[in-house]
Amino acid sequence: MSATPVIALRDITKTYGEGDTIVNALRGISLDIASGEYLAIMGASGSGKSTLMHIIGCLDVPTAGRYFLDGVAVASLDAYALGVVRNRKIGFVFQSFNLIPRTTAIANVELPLVYAGVKKAERLERAHIALESVGLADRVDHAPNQLSGGQQQRVAVARAIVTNPSIILADEPTGALDSESTSDMLDLFDVLHGQGRNIIVITHEHEVAERAARVVRLRDGSIIADDRRLSQPAPLSAGAQA
């Protein structure tokens, strides 16, 4: 792992509202995440974990504090540069899949490449490779309503990795899945981690957090524990079939 953290948060606070209605979602969060780490962020509803995810993913800005991504102060980036960061450095996976209905799997997966201005032939090739890597080479022309929940989440993962980001940011990625699909999804994250990517998972499920080498726990907008496991299951090889 690099000595310079890929993500460095310094005294991050986030407040909503004002006066009597003010909500302190984050209260002075400081956190370093090294390149290649597999991290789970846990906490009950209202603990601030989703707010923290939005800030790490450059989807929101802190009220105070500093955020450095690959050594660059995020606050110094304009809207265009932030869009490039979100498109190229960070792959997002959400609980609700966020797939476009009545659109094929491959069209969903190639969407980030459309935004990046990649030509159609290359987009299709890369989207096919991404879907193959998550075990859906035979489902490229299926719409979301023709896929199971686990398959829809695999499409979402393929979309997240099609730009080859170094960071996968997953918000409750197994919340809508059954136990078998959850296990398959966690195996897939092991594969992605084994390829050298950062995996950052927001979860309240212990089964999900147990796959991570490090677990950060939040309560009322503050970090109350930061635990590193002495050992963890070895990541599956990059070429393994999830």
Image (cartoon, rainbow, N blue to C red):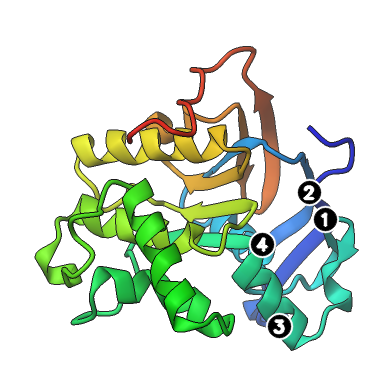
Amino acid of disc 2: Val
Residues marked 1 and 4 touching at CB (< 8 Å)? yes
SS of the residue under disc 1: loop
Q: Which mark is residue 117?
A: none
Task: Give me the C-alpha separation between circle 1 and circle 4.
Answer: 10 Å
**Which is in the foreground here, disc 3 or disc 1?**
1
The spot of residue 110 in percent (x, y) is 41, 73
Marks 3 and 1 close (CB-CB < 8 Å): no
Residue 18 x/y as whole percent: 71, 83
Tell me the residue that label 3 is attached to: 18
Q: Quadrant of the N terminus?
A: top right
Q: Are marks 2 and 3 in contact (CB under 8 Å)?
A: no
Q: Which residue is mark 2?
A: 6
First reached walking from the N terminus: tag 4 or tag 3: 3
Q: Earlier in the sequence, mark 4 or mark 2?
A: 2
Residue type at mark 4: give it.
Answer: Lys
Query: What x and y, as percent, mark residue 203?
Result: 46, 45
Residue at horizontal 29%, vertical 33%?
183
In the rendered view, would you say 82 is above or below 160? below
Taking 110 as reference, is 39 above or below it? above
In the depicted view, which residue is nearer to us: 220 or 104? Answer: 104
Q: Earlier in the sequence, mark 3 or mark 1?
A: 3
Circle 4 residue? 89
Q: Quadrant of residue 58?
A: bottom right
Q: Amino acid at mark 3?
A: Glu
Q: Where is mark 1, residue-wise?
A: 70
Callout 4: SS? loop
Tag 1–tag 2 contact (CB < 8 Å): yes
